[in-house]
Image (cartoon, rainbow, N blue to C red):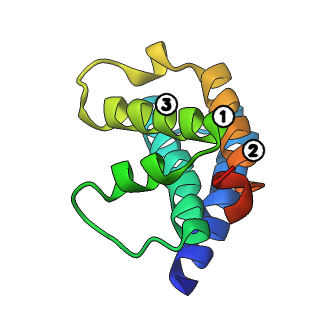
C-alpha cells in the first residue's frame, strides 16, 4: 500500500505539472491526452482501493473497487473515469478531439474531489 501512496502523490504532481504547461508543450497532444486520462483514473482508483483496503489485483479488481463505493457521486465519477480511460486506451480515433483540454480539466476536478474522500465517505 505504501507504494500506492507514493504513486498517487507522484501522479497527482505529474498531472498538475502537465496541465499547467499544456500550452507550451511541444509533444504530440494526442499522447498527452491519453496519458493524462489514464493517470487521472489510476490516481483516483488507487486512492479508493487504498481507502477501502481492498488487496485484490488483476481481473475484476476495478469493478470490485467501484462496486464497493456506496457514495453515489464518487461511484458514478470513478465509473465514468474508468469508461473514459478504457476508451482512451483501446479506441483508434483521436482522443484529444473527443476529450479536449476542457474535458481534461473537468476530469482533474473529479479526481481531486475523489482524493478528498476517506473510507467513511466512500462507504456512505
Q: Is residue 72 above or below residue 17?
A: above
Task: Determine whether, in the image, residue 67 is placed left or right of residue 6.
Answer: left
To which residue does mark 1 refer? 73
Labels 1 and 3: the sequence-earlier one = 1
Along the polypeptide, which appears first: circle 2 or circle 3?
Answer: 3
Q: Residue at x 51, y 20 (%)?
A: 99
Q: Nearer the viewer, mark 1 or mark 2?
A: 1
Residue pictured at 56% horizontal, 67% vertical: 52
Q: According to the image, label 2 marks what residue?
A: 113
- Residue projecting furthest to the front: 124
Residue placed under numbered mark 3 in the picture = 80
* Residue 17 seen in the figure: no
Judge left or right: residue 57 versus residue 3: left
Q: Residue at x 51, y 55 (%)?
A: 45
In the rendered picture of this protein, how many numbered marks are placed on residues?
3
Q: Residues within 10 Å of mark 1 (few under 14, many from 20)?
A: some
Q: Residues within 10 Å of mark 2 (few under 14, many from 20)?
A: some
Q: Nearer the viewer, mark 1 or mark 3?
A: 1
Taking depth in this image into account, of 85 and 51 the one nearest to the observer is: 51
**Residues under labels 1 and 3: Cα distance?**
11 Å
Q: Is residue 72 above or below residue 16?
A: above
- How many neighbours does mark 3 have within 10 angstroms: few (below 14), some (14-19), or many (20 or more)? some
Q: Are marks 1 and 2 in contact (CB under 8 Å)?
A: yes
Find residue 44 and report its horizontal and vertical position in percent: 58, 52
Left-right relation of 23 to 40 = right
Q: Tell me if I can see residue 15 in this picture.
A: yes
Residue 114, image x and y in percent? 68, 48
Residue 74: which quarter of the image?
A: top right
* Residue 95 x, y percent position in the rendering: 40, 23
The local secondary structure at tag 2 comes to helix
Amino acid at each position: 500500500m505504501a507504494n500506492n501512496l507514493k504513486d498517487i502523490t507522484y501522479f497527482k504532481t505529474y498531472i498538475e505539472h502537465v496541465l499547467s504547461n499544456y500550452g507550451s508543450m511541444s509533444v504530440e497532444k494526442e499522447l498527452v491526452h491519453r496519458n493524462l486520462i489514464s493517470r487521472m483514473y489510476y490516481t483516483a482508483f488507487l486512492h479508493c482501493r487504498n481507502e477501502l483496503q481492498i488487496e485484490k489485483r488483476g481481473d475484476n479488481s476495478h469493478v470490485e473497487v467501484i462496486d464497493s463505493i456506496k457514495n453515489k457521486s464518487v461511484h458514478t465519477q470513478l465509473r465514468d473515469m474508468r469508461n473514459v480511460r478504457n476508451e482512451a486506451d483501446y479506441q483508434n480515433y483521436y482522443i484529444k478531439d473527443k476529450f479536449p483540454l476542457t474535458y481534461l480539466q473537468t476530469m482533474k476536478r473529479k479526481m481531486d474531489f475523489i482524493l478528498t474522500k476517506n473510507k467513511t465517505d466512500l462507504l456512505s
